[in-house]
Every structure is written in C-alpha cells, then in structure tokens.
Image (tube, grey):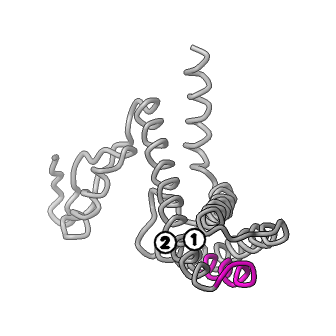
Amino acid sequence: MEKKGWLQGLFDYLNKHYLNQWIILVMEVLLMTVCSVVVCAGFVEITRDTLTWWGLGELCAVSTGVSLFGSLLLRSYRDPVRYAREATWLRMSGVILLKSLCVGWVLGGELTPRVVWVLVAVDFMFTVVCVAGVRLGMLVFYNFLCRLFRKENARVLVYGEGSKSVALEVRLRESTHYQVVGFLVPGNGKKRGM
C-alpha cells in the first residue's frame, strides 16, 4: 500500500506540473554534458591520445555552458514530450550540434585534428539518441502513471464537422486524458454520437 501511495503522489505531482520545463532543461543540459564526457573518454581510450585534467574541465564547462545557452536561446526545453513537434526536435538537434562543434573547437588543441572531427560527429549522434531516448522514456513513464491512476478520462464534445474537427477527434482519441463522445454540428441543432 505504501508503494502505491508513493506512486500516487508522484502521479499527482506530474499530473499537475508535468515535469516542469526547468526540470527538463536541467536534465537535458546535464545529459548533454555527460554524453560529451563519455564520447571524449571513449575516443581518448581508443586513439591512445592523452587528455589533461584541464582539458576535461574545459570540455565539461563548454559543454554545459553551450548546452544551457543554446537551450535557452532556441527554447528547446519548452515543449514537453507530449506536445513536441518537428520544430522542437530540430531546435534540440541545433543545440546539440552547436554543443558538439564547440566541444570539438575546445579539444582541437588537445587531440589530433582528424580525431576531433570524428569526435564531433559521434558526439552529435550519441547525444541526439540519448536526449531523444530520455524524452521518450519520460513520455512512456508518464503515460504508464496515467493509465495506472487515472480512473476516468474527461469527456469531450467536438464542435463542427469539418476536417479540423475530424483531425481534433483523431488526436484526442490517441490521448490518455480525453474521451470524445460525439460531435456538435452547427446550424441544424442535432447532436451526433460516436
């Protein structure tokens, strides 16, 4: 019973705040920094190059700073996963590309030039996969909690019968929060159930 109480509290918090955008920002910036460190450590080990502690500190500082600046500038953190569109993923990819290029620029003096460009490409790809995976994981976890604790969905009546109303009905049908019960068609005073 205690476990369900803890999960219920977490669900209530997420339902009210849905992982506040600032939490998403901090989580993604830290994840981007960790991805850069992991990729750099892997490349240093594989190529047998050396990286000083100063270089590692620069890597962490630049990765964190550029990720934070880019996320704030492009507002990639503002859309929760549920409402993310192509533009959100493009902005996020832009932030990650900017971060990877700056990390490559900082490590240009520490590693050989050929290794730096490969590191930039691998860092970009690895970070995109990790950030997308975390965002999708957040969505799956949130949907799991919704199904576990939400007893009843909000019943919705869609106004209109045009293509926009049908598109809205399709979108709401996929949602775990709403249940479309019918359409209200203007002009003829009739209600049509589904």
Q: Tell me where residue 46 sits by quadrant.
A: bottom right
Q: Residue furthest right?
A: 54
| Nearest the eye: 191 or 171 | 171
**Residue 125 in the image: above or below residue 106:** above
Q: Which residue is mark 2?
A: 88
Q: Quadrant of the N terminus?
A: top right
Q: Position of residue 179 (x, y in %)?
A: 31, 44
Q: Which residue is mark 1?
A: 76
**Residue 111 included in the magenta stretch of the image:** yes
| Nearest the eye: 4 or 71 | 71
Q: Amino acid at mark 1?
A: Ser
Q: Dot 1: within a 10 Å radius of its alpha carbon, few (fewer than 14), some, or many (20 or more) residues?
A: many
Q: Position of residue 102 (x, y in %)?
A: 67, 81
**Residue 40 in the image: above or below residue 140:** below
Q: Amino acid at mark 2?
A: Thr
**Residue 93 in the image: above or below residue 33:** below
Q: Say whether residue 156 is left or right of residue 71.
A: left
Identify the residue at image location x=45%, y=76%. Answer: 87
Asked whether disc 1 touches disc 2, contact meaning CB atoms under 8 Å apart, the reply is yes
Q: What is the CA distance from the residue labelled 1 to the residue labelled 2? A: 6 Å
Q: Position of residue 112 (x, y in %)?
A: 65, 82
For the record, the magenta segment spans 98-112
| Nearest the eye: 154 or 91 | 91
Could you tell me what secondary structure mostly forms the magenta stretch?
helix
Q: Say whether residue 190 is left or right of residue 109.
A: left
Identify the residue at image location x=67%, y=63%. Answer: 37
Q: Position of residue 27 (x, y in %)?
A: 65, 56
